[in-house]
Image (tube, rainbow, N blue to C red):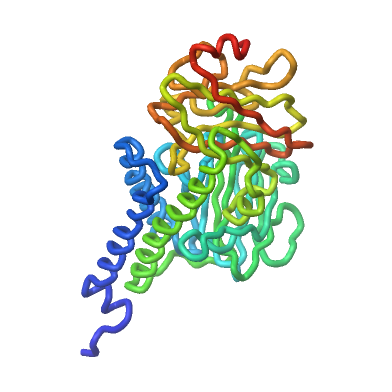
Amino acid sequence: MQPQQGSDADVVSGRAWEEFCDTLKRAGRQVLRPEGPADPLDRAEGFRYLTRLLRIGLEMHLEFADPDFPGFFLPSHETGKIGADNPDNRYLFARINGRNEYVIRGQRGTASYLSIGTQKGGYETNGRMEQTGFIDSARLQTDAEGHLEVRLSAHEQPGNWVRIEPESNAVIVRQTFKDRASERPAQLQISRAGAGARPEPLSAQRLQAGLRNAAGFVEGTARVFADWAQSYLQHPNQLPPADQALCQRAGGDPNIFYYHSYWSLAPDEALVVHVARIPQCRFWNLQINNWWMESLDYRYHRICHNIHSARPDPDGGVTMVLAHTDPGHPNWLETAGHALGTFCFRWVGATEHIHPTTRVVKHSELAREIKA
């Protein structure tokens, strides 16, 4: 019998698993960075964040990693969150190979905004997910019943088409809901043109690559957004425009203009966020995140307001209040037990970008500072 070599030997001996575990252990250093919070809640959420990234990474790089037989999965959701995940979004993600052609079919649903983009790179490699093609609901063609078909290929095709490059390795779908309870999400499937009947059995090479990439995804993603959070320390409790090019390199939607920052409030303080005027736009929202840039638990706490939920000011602007306890304002945002974190404001398809202003006030003085 010939001695086993390469991936076969690494999997059989357990070396592939040990390498996987070593990378995960090293990823914990991102939670222990000196500028990050060291209280029990934030540390606990930091280590839970790594387990959530691992779940996503295993889906992305092992369970749904075969670009010849792709399938959509949820890369961010209620218990798995990456990089200021939008609570008003439903995300779908699939692995592709830029040398193939693909088709997405399904029902459009009623989400107010839907986009489909192809990407290259990855947080586990170069820390980037750069766009290679894009289409959104303003250009998507559907039939009378809302069915759609989208082609993904290197060469333009009639109808709905999204460009891919040889280096393209993923497609992401964003659905944005003004009122998730009353809107119906799209039902979409993806397949490779000319795919065979079924995939080959799992090989040692695929297992080793999947484990290596999944662990690298955990470490790389944690590092990317820990770096982002660290950069926000220079403007606490403010909400300046983000580096839009950086957001796009990290996989942002080209129709979105982003604001990111850091907040920190004493028990008797509140943060007032004011937008003087709402321009014509397809969507906007403000969301509250923890230090690790995970949206706070929106299943149980009001941590986001959007174009539908926020009560406007009499002059047409909007005022929102982040506070530890209910200030009696209709646009209260909860800290959900956190003393600090990050936050994000976004315009989607706005004709202009009205920059939010912020100010910290004593909770007891809110009634005088603002009028609901």
Q: In which quarter of the image is residue 108?
A: top right
Q: In which quarter of the image is residue 240?
A: top right
- The percent coordinates of residue 194 (x first, y second) are 57, 67
**Can the viewer see residue 262 in this picture?**
yes
- The percent coordinates of residue 358 (x first, y second) are 61, 28
In this view, the residue farthest toward the bottom is 2
What residue do we see at 69% from left, 50% from top? 135
What residue do we see at 49% from left, 16% from top? 363
Looking at the picture, tell me which residue is in the foreground, 2 or 42. Answer: 42
Quadrant where the N terminus is found in the figure: bottom left
Q: Is residue 48 above or below residue 205?
A: above
Quadrant where the C terminus is found in the figure: top right
- The percent coordinates of residue 338 (x first, y second) are 40, 30
**Can the viewer see residue 89 in this picture?**
no
Looking at the picture, tell me which residue is in the foreground, 308 or 328. Answer: 328
Q: In this view, does 92 lie above or below 193?
A: above
What residue do we see at 41% from left, 64% from top? 213
Looking at the picture, tell me which residue is in the foreground, 107 or 9. Answer: 9
- The percent coordinates of residue 92 (x first, y second) are 53, 47
Q: Is residue 120 above or below residue 279?
A: below
Looking at the picture, tell me which residue is in the foreground, 186 or 286. Answer: 286
Q: In which quarter of the image is residue 282?
A: top right
**How many callouts does the rendering have?**
0
Using residue 64 as the reference point, say whether residue 353 is left or right of it: right
What residue do we see at 61% from left, 14% from top? 370
